[in-house]
């Protein structure tokens, strides 16, 4: 798998070839750094949700390994997708502007503060390219979502990993203490992946205000929609206050758009301008996806129902673990991490033999399992398999 061609890069490469010289005109700055990452990624072996899925059984009883939302997208989003097919021969410029305008109106920001893209991954990679220039350091928690820092190291960055606190949260004080003249960016995933823990909002706001005066702060809020009140916890207010931070959001989680690919960042207009050097932004998005996002954005009733089902499945998982004598880290997201009593890779393999896909980590000298929250039948399949191994 590590030596195979990455699907996203294959699509990107195919588009480049199809476009010919016309594509390259005026776009050299966007492409300059891409071959470096593409070449290195193909030879870098790391376990990701993608590699686990590609190596998994073709049919699983429970696909609990990629933090996907099995309850979406909503009926309204699905209808919008079907309706959009008739005009999908047209570039969706007006649609993407409508979507970013809808987001801007809800958040109380300007459209110039927003860059849309096909998921948040291209934006994470753009940040990795730019803020690692000159061998700058990237500070993250350990463990935390590693897409951005991994790509930064491919570009020559120094990855500074800061251990979590005793309650498995990002250690903001320790991370701030690591900031120096060579720091290119501080990456905060909140809620954190893979631990599912959330930071105190006021403490994080204070961190962003102080640290953003020294270097860029990137706050990844991929899972924030799973919180009771996302608006009370988001750092978008820091952008509105003029601070030097980037906030990433995605439709891949509670909205159920993981396969549709829709995400965005909120930042200062000058920062958006920097990102435009590395990614085509909303031009990468399909008309079908954008139409679905417009229909599904802030669709409160559906989102609340999906959240209710997620919490019910999560509570079932908690009860299953407790019954078998296992502890777990209380989660603020759509996944739960718990310590194992056997080798992590062996556990993953044995669960997969029983048709259940999960992920494993190792940190603090302990093997851990991360279980994504699925439908109740999937959680029951996990419980049945888990009882055979626990």
Image (cartoon, helix red, strand yellow):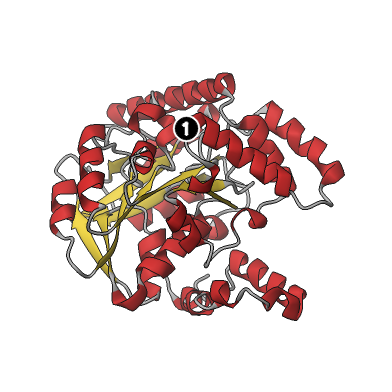
What is the crowding at mark 1: few (fewer than 14 residues within 10 Å), some, or many (at least 20)?
Answer: few
Identify the image quadrant of residue 179. bottom left
Q: How many marks?
A: 1
Compared to residue 294, the image places residue 290 above or below, namely below
Compared to residue 14, the image places residue 213 above or below, namely above
Provide the residue designation for mark 1: 108
Residue drawn at (63%, 31%) of the image = 296
Q: Position of residue 362 (x, y in %)?
A: 27, 56
183, 167: nearer the viewer: 183
113, 95: nearer the viewer: 113
Quarter containing the C terminus: top left
Compared to residue 275, the image places residue 240 above or below, namely above
- Assign a secondary structure to mark 1: loop
Q: Can you see residue 98? A: yes
Q: Residue furthest right?
A: 86
Q: Can you see residue 354? A: no
Residue drawn at (59%, 56%) of the image = 281
Residue drawn at (77%, 53%) of the image = 91
Q: Position of residue 247 (x, y in %)?
A: 40, 46
In the image: residue 33, left or right of residue 216? right
In the image: residue 304, left or right of residue 23? left
In the image: residue 90, left or right of residue 331? right
Compared to residue 167, the image places residue 125 above or below, namely below
Q: Position of residue 354 (x, y in %)?
A: 50, 45
Q: Position of residue 277 (x, y in %)?
A: 52, 67
Identify the image quadrant of residue 291. top right
In the image: residue 120, left or right of residue 58? left
């Amino acid at each position: 798998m590590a030596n195979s061609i990455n699907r996203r890069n294959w699509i990107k490469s195919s588009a480049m070839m199809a476009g010919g010289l016309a594509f390259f005109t005026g776009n050299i700055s966007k492409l300059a750094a891409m071959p470096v990452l593409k070449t290195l990624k193909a030879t870098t072996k790391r376990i990701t949700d993608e590699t686990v899925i590609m190596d998994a059984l073709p049919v699983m009883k429970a696909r609990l390994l990629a933090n996907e939302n099995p309850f979406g997208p909503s009926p309204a989003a699905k209808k919008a997708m079907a309706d959009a097919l008739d005009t999908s021969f047209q570039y969706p410029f007006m649609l993407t502007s409508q979507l970013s305008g809808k987001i801007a109106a809800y958040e109380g920001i300007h459209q110039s503060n927003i860059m849309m893209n096909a998921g948040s991954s291209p934006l994470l990679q753009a940040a990795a390219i730019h803020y690692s220039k000159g061998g700058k350091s990237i500070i993250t928690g350990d463990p935390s979502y590693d897409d951005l820092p991994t790509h930064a190291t491919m570009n020559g960055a120094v990855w500074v990993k800061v251990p979590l606190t005793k309650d498995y949260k990002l250690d903001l004080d320790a991370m701030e203490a690591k900031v120096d003249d060579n720091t290119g960016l501080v990456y905060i995933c909140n809620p954190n992946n893979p631990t599912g823990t959330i930071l105190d909002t006021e403490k994080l706001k204070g961190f962003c205000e102080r640290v953003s005066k020294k270097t860029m702060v990137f706050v990844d809020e991929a899972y924030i929609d799973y919180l009771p009140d996302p608006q009370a916890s988001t750092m978008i207010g820091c952008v509105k206050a003029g601070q030097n931070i980037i906030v990433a959001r995605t439709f891949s989680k509670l909205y159920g758009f993981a396969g549709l690919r829709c995400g965005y960042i909120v930042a200062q207009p000058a920062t958006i301008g920097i990102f435009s050097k590395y990614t085509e932004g909303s031009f990468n998005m399909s008309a079908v996806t954008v139409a679905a996002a417009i229909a599904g954005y802030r669709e409160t009733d559906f989102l609340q129902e999906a959240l209710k089902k997620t919490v019910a499945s999560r509570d079932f998982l908690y009860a299953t673990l407790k019954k078998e004598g296992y502890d777990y880290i209380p989660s603020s997201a759509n996944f739960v991490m718990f310590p194992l009593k056997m080798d992590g890779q062996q556990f993953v393999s044995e669960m997969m033999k029983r048709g259940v896909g999960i992920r494993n980590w190792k940190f603090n000298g302990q093997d851990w399992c991360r279980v994504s929250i699925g439908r109740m039948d999937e959680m029951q399949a996990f419980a049945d398999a888990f009882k055979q191994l626990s």
